[in-house]
Each structure stands twice: as C-alpha cells, then as structure tokens.
Image (tube, helix red, strand yellow):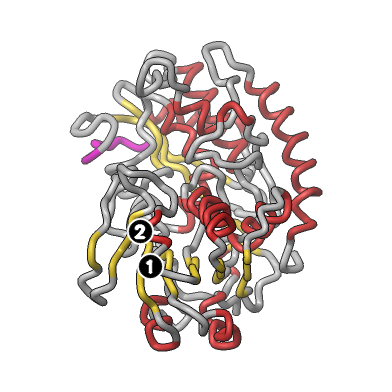
C-alpha cells in the first residue's frame, strides 16, 4: 500500500523539535489511518498556527473565494489565509508566528491547480526569511509517469500557472518543491518527508480505501483524471459541469444537442474515454438555472487516457459544431489576458486556432520536460 509522508513523520521528528511550527494544510491533510495532520502535529510538536490555501484549511471555501485570517474553532489556533485580499504570500505577522513551516496537501499533479503555486510561494518566502520548510509528501494521483501539455510561456504566468512546466507535469509536491529550489538556486532549508510504497501509478492502485476530494469541484478520481483536459472549458462560455453532480465530467451549454455530440465524439476514437448524452440545469456558476445539453465523459482505460489531448480535441469539436455557444471568454478586465490563455499557458487559443499544430508542439515540449524532470524524482517509477 502507498502511504503518505505524514504516516512517517515520527521518523523525522527532529525536524520539528527546535521551534514553533505552522502547518499549511487543507481538508486532504490526513494520515492513512484517517487522522488529521493537525491533530498529529499538535501531539508531537509546538504547533502555533495554521495556514490555509485556496478552499481553506477545512475545505469549506468556494473556488476562487478570498478569505481573511480567523481562529480555527476546533483547535483555537490562528489561521492565516494565503488566499486573501491582501495577497497569497507569507506576510510579516505570519512569519512572526513560526520558525518551521510544514506543508501537507494532496495535490493533483496539474499546473493550473493552485496548491502548487502556493507551494512555490512558500519555497521562495521561507528561503527569503530563513525559515525551514518541511513537505509531507503524497503520491501524484495521476501516476507521476505521463507528462502532457505545453510548457507555460513566461508571458502567461499567473496563480494558475506559476512555473514553466506542462499542464500534467508528473511530479509529487515534494519533487516539485525540490525542482524549484534547486533549479532557481533559492537556498531554502527544504526537507521532504517521503511517501512509502509508491513507485508511480494512479490513485486506484495505491491500496488506499478513501478518495479524499482535494476540493469540492473534484469529488471523484474519475473527475480529477478528466480535469486535466476539461479544465480548459473554464475559459469558454460552455459549462464545465460546476453546479452538477459531475463537475469536469459534464460539458455543455444551452441549445446543444447531446445526442449529436455523443455521436461526433465517438467518431473521434479517442483512447481511454467514452461519452454519453446529458441534459442538465446547473445550480451554480455558468448557465445557472438554464437548461443545457452536452456530454458526460467516462474513463474506460486510465492508462490509455490522455486527458489534455482529449480536452483540446473536445474543445475543437464544440467550437466547430456550436461556435456561438462555445467561444472563449473575454478578459475579466480590459488589458488583462483571457483566462483560456492563463490555463493553456500560451496565446494560441484565439479564433481560428489550429488543434493539430497546438497538440504537435505540446507533444514535443512534454517529451523534453519528461526527460528534464527525472533529475528531481524522489521515487522510482515502476
């Protein structure tokens, strides 16, 4: 069975004994025995503060919701928000509250999932402030072997794309932190408490009985696997399934014929996935309260599935068949970059974009990154 870094923290207790400890965590910060990392650290060290990323320490904040500091009702500890109107970095009042920062969050191995941006900020901020950073590592749910997507271009850096890596980068949080610290010569006092029993491979093979959803939009592993590609629809007028029972598996919008889309999708012959017609009324987000049609996606073979290529191909299909319903959203404010450009990390997704050219370039870039990232592996990939 694959185990988590927190399961082995007692072997690394010396890293935490010489100062005040803060824990940056989320609802996924739990041991294999289903005990909260918060409670484990309270027993073994001087835990003085909690830090919350997007969605909060307890996972009770909506996607994109900015929150302030508060007191955790369960423990009485101060909670400092790293997703607040004041910013997403360690500020002086936070730094004054701890000597050692522990990070324990289950990531999903995708560039636009904001936990990795928070982690990179912590590597930079702890290096600048002379604080120790201890990452309690967790396996990559998508397996840590396959790399997909184009490398983010510097002009499109944002909190949904903080480093020049592909969409699906094939690293654990500990490996990613190590890569950033070493490549950028930050000099962070970084320590990774490793996973156990993991040699690459997706979540269903870990032997862990519980999928702890990393956020409310990813309640299942199947949805998380498809999110690698269907997240692109957040940059379009189409619904990505928020406000339904299957976010990032349901894609569609008003006036779309699900039966037609299912036939067209089947004709593409994409590996590892199938689609069925669906008709739905989102309870929140885009097209709230409006009848929509579209597709519900299913993973039939995870090893064969290439979700990033699937997402790009599906976007092309919707825009060819239903151009008026599936256009790219304009920037939130004049002069800013469209969200589709931030998600894809490039400026190619404009009217008349070329699917084959995009996928060919992304394939070259992902192959090159797959070779580069191997230098930072902490685990063999079987």
Residue carrying label 1? 97
Identify residue for label 2. 93
Q: Residue at x 55, y 75 (%)?
A: 4
Total marks in image: 2
**Residues at marks 1 and 2, CA–CA distance in whole angstroms:** 7 Å
Relative to 164, is 237 on the left or the right?
left
Image location of residue 344, percent across then percent down: 56, 31
100 and 218: which is toward the camera:
100
Which residue is nearer to you in this view: 360 or 27? 27
| Magenta-highlighted residues | 277-284
Residue 242 lies, in percent from the top left, at 32, 41
What is the number of the mark on residue 205? none
| Snapshot quadrant of residue 34 | bottom left
Q: Position of residue 259 (x, y in %)?
A: 40, 30
Q: Residue at x 42, y 81 (%)?
A: 41
Tags 1 and 2 in contact by the CB under 8 Å rule?
yes
User: Which type of secondary structure does the marked residue at label 1 adopt?
Assistant: loop
Q: In the figure, 56 relative to 110: above or below?
A: below
Q: Secondary structure at mark 2?
A: helix
- Residue 340 belongs to the span the image colors magenta: no
Q: Residue furthest top?
A: 352
């Amino acid at each position: 069975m694959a185990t988590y870094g927190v399961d082995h923290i007692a072997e690394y207790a010396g890293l935490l004994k010489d100062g005040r400890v803060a824990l940056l965590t989320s609802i996924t910060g739990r041991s294999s025995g289903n005990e909260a990392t918060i409670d484990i650290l309270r027993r073994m060290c001087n835990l003085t503060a909690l830090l919350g990323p997007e969605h909060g320490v307890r996972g009770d904040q909506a996607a994109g919701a900015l929150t302030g500091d508060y007191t955790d009702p369960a423990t009485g500890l101060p909670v400092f928000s790293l997703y607040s109107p004041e910013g997403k970095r360690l500020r002086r009042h936070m730094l004054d509250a701890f000597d050692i920062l522990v990070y324990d969050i289950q990531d999903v191995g995708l560039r636009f999932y904001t936990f990795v941006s928070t982690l990179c900020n912590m590597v930079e901020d702890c290096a600048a402030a002379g604080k120790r950073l201890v990452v309690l590592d967790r396996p990559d749910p998508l397996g840590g072997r396959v790399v997909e997507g184009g490398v983010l271009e510097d002009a499109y850096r944002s909190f949904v794309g903080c480093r020049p890596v592909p969409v699906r980068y094939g690293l654990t949080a500990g490996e990613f932190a190590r890569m950033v610290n070493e490549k950028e010569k930050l000099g962070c006092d970084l320590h990774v408490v490793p996973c156990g029993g993991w040699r690459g491979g997706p979540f269903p093979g870990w032997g862990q009985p519980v999928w702890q959803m990393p956020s409310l939009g990813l309640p299942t592993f199947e949805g998380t696997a498809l999110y690698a590609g269907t997240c692109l629809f957040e940059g379009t007028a189409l619904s990505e399934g928020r406000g339904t029972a299957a976010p990032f598996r349901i894609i569609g919008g008003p006036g779309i014929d699900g039966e037609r889309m299912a036939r067209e999708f089947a004709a593409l012959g994409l590996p590892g996935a199938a689609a069925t017609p669906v008709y739905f009324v989102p309870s929140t987000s885009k097209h709230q309260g409006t009848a929509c049609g579209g597709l519900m996606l299913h993973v039939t073979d995870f090893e064969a599935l290439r979700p990033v290529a699937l997402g790009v191909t599906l976007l092309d299909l919707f825009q060819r068949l239903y151009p008026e319903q599936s256009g790219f959203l304009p920037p939130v404010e004049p002069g800013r970059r469209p969200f589709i450009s931030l998600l894809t990390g490039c400026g190619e997704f404009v009217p008349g974009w070329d699917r084959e050219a995009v996928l060919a370039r992304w394939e070259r870039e992902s192959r090159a990154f797959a070779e580069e990232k191997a230098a930072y592996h902490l685990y063999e990939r079987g």
